[in-house]
Amino acid sequence: MRVCVVGAGVAGALLAWRLVVEHGARVTLLAGAARPDATAASGGLVRAFERDPEVARLAALSLAELRTSRTLREWSGYRSGTSLYVLAPPDGYAGCAGPDGRVAPPDALPPSAERCDARRLADEFGVRGLPEGAVGVLEPHAGHISPDGLRRAVIADLVARGADLPSGRLRAVSCDEQGGGVRYRTGAGHGTADVLVAATGAWTPRLLRSLGVTAADEAVRTKVIQCAVYRAGGLLPPAFVDETSGLYGRPAGPGRMLLGLPTERWGAEPGAARFLDHEERAVRRAAGRRLPGLSLGGLTRPVAAVDAYGPAGRLALTPVPGTSGRLFTFTGGSGGSAKLALAASREAASGLPARLPPHTSRPGHVPITTTRRETS
């Protein structure tokens, strides 16, 4: 099986790595030009608890593999720690209200997780001012990683294993109906493969439009992610997400705290995110309300990037319509790719052969051929 993976964020790099290491596929990884992306900007929170059952399943599997693999722990810079998830009591959250009308988290908690009431949230973690009915999920064995560090280590291992990482940005793709494969062209040459997977994150809508795919912007939407690392003192919380305010964060070293809020900057052009002062001030205000024991100083690292948001709300391998089953996307992590990427990449790599058209070459048969452009 010959696969061309376009995009070398954490999702694309892990997918290429799984295909090579676990399935013996011949893989070309088109990284393109180095530029700011969501992998570099990610805060890297990892945990097992999520509202959505499918997202929770992938998150739990990813965390379990991370914690049991010394290699992945080292590559990702994994730091074990407590994760705190504060749930808001949304209207109509069926099946969660008790006899007294208070809303509790879902019953399907990770094995090591426990429910945490408002008093404990305030006394132990300094989380205050929560609306009536808000509760927490506490995971003692979660933590955070460096998605960028994991991406770089995986790519280095691919190079050591002889995978092809040609230079040049993808410029054209066509499906060869007679040959039963894909032809692609980069700025440095051209190649062929059985299948091409676009793990291109926020650049996916632009790529799909260039291929003539209708409703490209509806398939994957883009949005700016903004956060920052602050000098911090006082009562520093563990890694957390607070649904009631949108605030999220994690410790970022001694006397440092990473904090952010979701933005509403939809439809942003990839690679062109600006760090906005008024959004940063909103983070300070939210932290002042929810974490009054936390003292924030100046910024040490402002971060702004554009991420991809898919309809499934998670990383998913999706066929591109009208391409005879030869083109797929693997993107749409919706701001949470870091905690899903290990399991999602394994399942995508395992499921890809079954989704290919008949008579596609099997793993280990015919390598991708890459022809360099002649120069005079």
Image: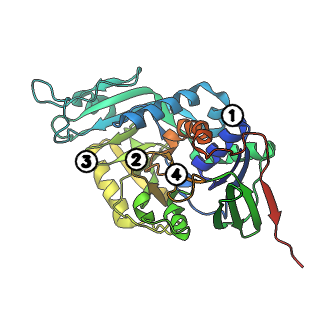
State which quadrant residue 239 falls in.
Answer: top left
Q: Which residue is mark 1?
A: 22
Quadrant where the N terminus is found in the figure: top right
In the structure shown, which secondary structural element does the residue marked by tag 1 occupy? helix
Where is residue 131 drawn, in percent x and y?
18, 40
Q: Position of residue 15 (x, y in %)?
A: 62, 44
* Residue 238 seen anywhere in this rendered image of the structure: no
Q: Earlier in the sequence, mark 2 or mark 3?
A: 3
- Real-space Cα separation, disc 3 to disc 1, in angstroms: 48 Å
Q: Quadrant of the C terminus?
A: bottom right
Disc 3 from disc 4: Cα separation: 45 Å
The Cα atoms of the two marked residues, 2 and 4, are separated by 16 Å
Report how far apart the C-alphas of labels 1 and 4 lie in the structure.
Answer: 22 Å
Q: Label 2 vs label 3: CA separation? A: 29 Å
Mark 2 packing: few (<14 Cα in 10 Å), some, or many (20+)? some
Q: Which mark is residue 319?
A: 4
Q: Is residue 214 above or below residue 226?
A: below
Mark 3 and mark 1 lie on one chain; the one further toward the N terminus is 1
The nearer-to-camera label among 3 and 1 is 1
Q: Residue furthest right?
A: 376
Residue 364: x percent and y percent?
Answer: 77, 40
The answer to which of 149 and 284 lies nearer the viewer is 149
Between marks 3 and 4 in the image, the one whose residue lies nearer the viewer: 4
Instruction: For the residues labelled 2 and 4, say whether their Cβ atoms are less than 8 Å apart.
Output: no
Q: Amino acid at mark 2?
A: Gly
**Residue extending farthest bottom:** 376
State which tag comes first along the sequence, 2 or 1: 1
Find numbered disc 3 in the image and state the secondary structure of the residue it sits on. Answer: helix
* Callout in the foreground (2, 4): 4
Going by the numbered disc 3, the residue's amino acid type is: Arg
How many neighbours does mark 1 have within 10 angstroms: few (below 14), some (14-19), or many (20 or more)? few
* Circle 3 residue: 289
